[in-house]
Amino acid sequence: MPKLLEQELLTYQAHKSELLAKARGKFVLIKNDQIIGLFETSKDARREGYQRFGVVPMLVKEILEVETPLFFSARLAGA
Protein backbone atom coordinates (compact mmCIF):
# COMPACT_ATOMS: atom_id res chain seq x y z
CA MET A 1 0.00 0.00 0.00
CA PRO A 2 1.39 3.45 -0.90
CA LYS A 3 2.32 5.78 1.92
CA LEU A 4 -0.32 8.35 2.76
CA LEU A 5 0.24 11.60 0.80
CA GLU A 6 3.44 10.32 -0.84
CA GLN A 7 2.29 11.43 -4.32
CA GLU A 8 1.19 14.83 -3.01
CA LEU A 9 4.56 15.42 -1.32
CA LEU A 10 6.42 14.41 -4.49
CA THR A 11 4.28 16.86 -6.45
CA TYR A 12 5.04 19.63 -3.96
CA GLN A 13 8.79 18.96 -4.18
CA ALA A 14 8.69 18.90 -7.99
CA HIS A 15 7.03 22.35 -8.07
CA LYS A 16 8.56 23.91 -4.96
CA SER A 17 10.80 26.44 -6.73
CA GLU A 18 7.97 27.80 -8.90
CA LEU A 19 5.61 27.88 -5.90
CA LEU A 20 8.20 29.82 -3.87
CA ALA A 21 8.62 32.31 -6.72
CA LYS A 22 4.93 33.11 -7.00
CA ALA A 23 3.31 32.25 -3.68
CA ARG A 24 5.83 32.19 -0.82
CA GLY A 25 4.00 32.13 2.52
CA LYS A 26 0.67 31.10 1.00
CA PHE A 27 -0.88 27.65 1.16
CA VAL A 28 -1.11 25.12 -1.64
CA LEU A 29 -3.76 22.43 -2.00
CA ILE A 30 -2.55 19.28 -3.76
CA LYS A 31 -4.58 16.16 -4.56
CA ASN A 32 -2.70 13.24 -6.11
CA ASP A 33 -0.37 14.87 -8.66
CA GLN A 34 -2.48 18.01 -9.23
CA ILE A 35 -1.97 21.44 -7.73
CA ILE A 36 -5.56 22.48 -7.10
CA GLY A 37 -4.93 26.04 -5.98
CA LEU A 38 -3.13 28.62 -3.87
CA PHE A 39 -4.76 30.17 -0.82
CA GLU A 40 -4.10 32.88 1.76
CA THR A 41 -4.89 30.58 4.71
CA SER A 42 -4.81 26.87 5.42
CA LYS A 43 -8.47 27.10 6.40
CA ASP A 44 -9.40 28.38 2.93
CA ALA A 45 -7.37 25.60 1.30
CA ARG A 46 -8.97 22.89 3.46
CA ARG A 47 -12.44 24.27 2.82
CA GLU A 48 -11.88 24.11 -0.94
CA GLY A 49 -10.49 20.59 -0.66
CA TYR A 50 -13.45 19.34 1.38
CA GLN A 51 -15.92 20.94 -1.03
CA ARG A 52 -14.26 19.38 -4.07
CA PHE A 53 -13.24 15.99 -2.75
CA GLY A 54 -14.97 15.33 0.56
CA VAL A 55 -13.12 14.12 3.63
CA VAL A 56 -10.26 12.26 1.94
CA PRO A 57 -6.47 12.54 2.13
CA MET A 58 -5.11 15.69 0.47
CA LEU A 59 -2.15 17.93 1.14
CA VAL A 60 -2.48 21.49 2.40
CA LYS A 61 0.99 22.94 2.88
CA GLU A 62 2.44 26.36 3.58
CA ILE A 63 4.94 27.30 0.90
CA LEU A 64 8.21 27.95 2.72
CA GLU A 65 11.84 27.84 1.66
CA VAL A 66 13.05 26.46 4.98
CA GLU A 67 10.69 24.13 6.75
CA THR A 68 10.70 23.59 10.49
CA PRO A 69 10.35 19.93 11.43
CA LEU A 70 7.46 19.12 13.73
CA PHE A 71 7.92 16.55 16.44
CA PHE A 72 5.06 14.67 18.04
CA SER A 73 5.07 12.43 21.03
CA ALA A 74 3.87 8.90 20.29
CA ARG A 75 1.21 9.56 22.92
CA LEU A 76 -0.11 12.59 21.02
CA ALA A 77 0.11 10.83 17.65
CA GLY A 78 -2.19 8.06 18.82
CA ALA A 79 0.44 5.33 18.79
Image (cartoon, helix red, strand yellow):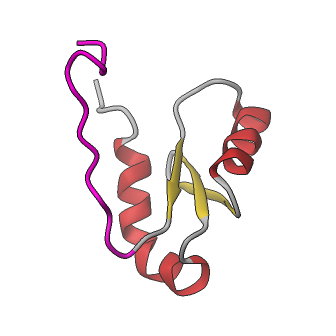
x and y percentages locating residue 45 in the rendered image? 68, 49
Q: Residue furthest bottom?
A: 21
- Majority secondary structure of the magenta segment? loop
In the image, is residue 70 part of the stretch drawn in magenta?
yes
Q: Which residues are magenta?
A: 65-79
In the image, is residue 42 part of the stretch drawn in magenta?
no
Pick whichever, 23 or 76, lies toward us: 76
Q: Residue at x 35, y 56 (%)?
A: 10
Residue 77 lies, with reference to residue 61, above or below; the image says above
Residue 43 lies, with reference to residue 73, above or below; the image says below
x and y percentages locating residue 68 in the rendered image? 29, 59
Question: Which quarter of the figure has residue 66?
Answer: bottom left
Q: Residue at x 34, y 43 (%)?
A: 6
x and y percentages locating residue 14 in the rendered image? 38, 69
- 61 left or right, relative to 50: left
The C terminus lies in quadrant = top left
Pick whichever, 33 or 30, lies toward us: 30
- 26 left or right, relative to 1: right
x and y percentages locating residue 50 in the rendered image? 72, 33
- 58 left or right, relative to 51: left
The N terminus lies in quadrant = top left
Q: Residue at x 38, y 52 (%)?
A: 9
Q: Residue at x 64, y 24 (%)?
A: 55
